[in-house]
Image (cartoon, rainbow, N blue to C red):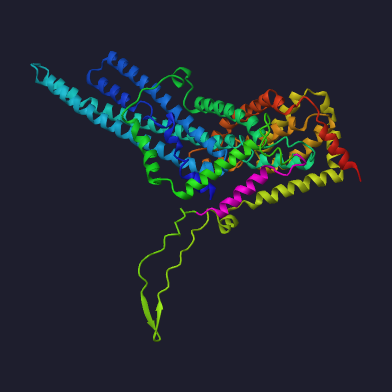
Amino acid sequence: MLPEFWSCPLSVLSAELPGAESDELIGAAATNHEAREQSVNGSSETVGVATQKRRGYEQNLVYRITMLMLGFMSVTAFLSMWISNTATTAMMLPIAQAVLKQLSKSETEKADRELREGRDNQAFEMAEVTNTKNPLENVNQYEISGPEPTMDSLAERMRKEREQRYLWLNKGMSLSVCYSASIGGTATLTGTTPNLILKGQMDHLFPENPNVINFATWFGFSCPNMVLMLLLSWLWLQFMYLGLNFKKTFGCGSKNKSDQEAYDVIRQEFKKLGRMKFAEAAVLTIFVVLVVLWFSREPGFIPGWASPLNEYGQFVTDGTVAILISTLLFLIPSQMPKCFCCINKQEQEETVEEGNLVPERQKKVKAPPALLEWKVVHERMPWNIVLLLGGGYALATGAEVSGLSDWLGESLAPLQNIPPFSISLLLCLLVGMFTECSSNTATTTLFLPILASMAKTIHLHPLYVMLPCTISASMAFMLPVATPPNAIAFSYGTLKVLDMAKAGFMLNLIGILCINLAINTWGTVMFDLNTFPSWINITTNATATP
């Protein structure tokens, strides 16, 4: 129920961003103006002026398209923080495709219109020349009909160039949406499954840890990293498909009347949604309450509302809040409750039944359905995540009981002589390559118990390697099969595997470098990663005791 609600009011947030007021794409009108002037008088000066006009138009247009891309990436990343990456990509890509289609249609119509106007103006100007007293009348007639094939060929060439530009823009926009969905999912603890696996493994392998991973601490670490990665990926995709121009990208663009055509597409979809219904407002309110309770439970810098309840143990966790909110969804009605104190005062009609007067039964008032019903939960709940988390715990326990974890930890003991920064970087690269060929969930489930055992052996804080490797498992940008958002973008038919590999390889490196920058700066301060925690020894001794 929650994804369906968010898909209504939030999918149109891109219309409110500055980048959503998109312009017509690169220079068809100015190009046709150039061809028309050249065919009339052949003046190189006029061609130069028209070319400069076209360049200015293109630069302004590139600015508008880059802002459009940033707008879509920002909205996609924000949605992916709260709902699944797959649902976000499936929701945002059709909107992006509709905007690009409207842009292409607008530019084509404008180019055809200016081409027709150019031919009319040319015929008018040539008619003035033939009316003068010129003895070479036949030459003037030849000049009238001569440039027509040239204009047609130029129009055809401009059409092909325009289609090629839109193809590249389509590729860049599709990649920006699917990549930003994967990046945005790393910002919150519930954004993607690997984050929850890390939380579960930390609580399972180190039960004495002081709830070091919770919603607030994860958001404080990962959200700045997500913003940094999003901006760098925007610049990289801009360089790949639009051309990077800092002056125009961060400058100011002028508006054009035709800008509204693509903007109107989103506005029309927004109007179709209508006013927010009671059920939507209720779900939104409950969701805001959920996030506030998660953040304020144990903020870290001040005591949270759960601190008195957890004085003698961890009785209230993030899962407690989630269960409470889920229960409310089953209790709150989906329609505005009516006032039952007002009884229908219409006179009761009497009917004759076997000679007796019997009052007609009033209609029973049927209670509206709840916001969430078990049938919907049973059909749409991702039960595979529950089974996968349980399987991960079983795998970790089996490796620990059989001695596999200790053996792997001893085998990796020589890493103790390597600087911790290099260890984290190498492990992130290993996980990043592995996750391209398998799901990020399976990668995290396989690697985290091994990394925890290695950290204990070399006396390194477990989070120093487990946290960056968990986020690196979401950096699957190179192949369509690496993650569902990539597969959805690839299914539209405009992308090739080589396109995704070229753009994704650099993004993988950018993401891994950003993660290691985060873990060695504010991550070290937040989690005190320079100190080997005492709760690891307590957990180890408790496990070793028969």
- Name the side, left or right, on which 25 lies relative to 207: left
Q: Residue at x 56, y 25 (%)?
A: 232
**Outermost residue toward the top in this view:** 45
Please name whichever residue, 108 or 155, is drawn nearer the observer in this view of the structure.
108
Q: Position of residue 456 (x, y in %)?
A: 83, 33
Q: Position of residue 334 (x, y in %)?
A: 49, 53
**Outermost residue toward the right in this view:** 546
Q: Which residues are magenta?
A: 311-333
Q: Is residue 535 above or below residue 382?
A: above
Image quadrant in which you'd find residue 443:
top right
Please name whichever residue, 313 or 240, is drawn nearer the observer in this view of the structure.
313
Magenta highlight: main SS:
helix
Image quadrant in which you'd find residue 189:
top right
Image quadrant in which you'd find residue 525:
top right
Q: Position of residue 216 (x, y in %)?
A: 65, 34
- Name the side, left or right, on which 277 lies relative to 209: left
How many numbered marks, from 0 up? 0
Question: Looking at the image, can residue 492 be seen?
Answer: no
Q: Is residue 204 magenta?
A: no
Q: Is residue 314 magenta?
A: yes
**Outermost residue toward the left in this view:** 133
Q: Is residue 485 above or below residue 299?
A: below
Question: Looking at the image, can residue 209 be seen?
Answer: yes
Q: Position of residue 318 (x, y in %)?
A: 67, 42
Please name whichever residue, 54 or 135, is drawn nearer the observer in this view of the structure.
54
**Outermost residue toward the bottom in this view:** 355
- Name the side, left or right, on which 252 lies relative to 472: left
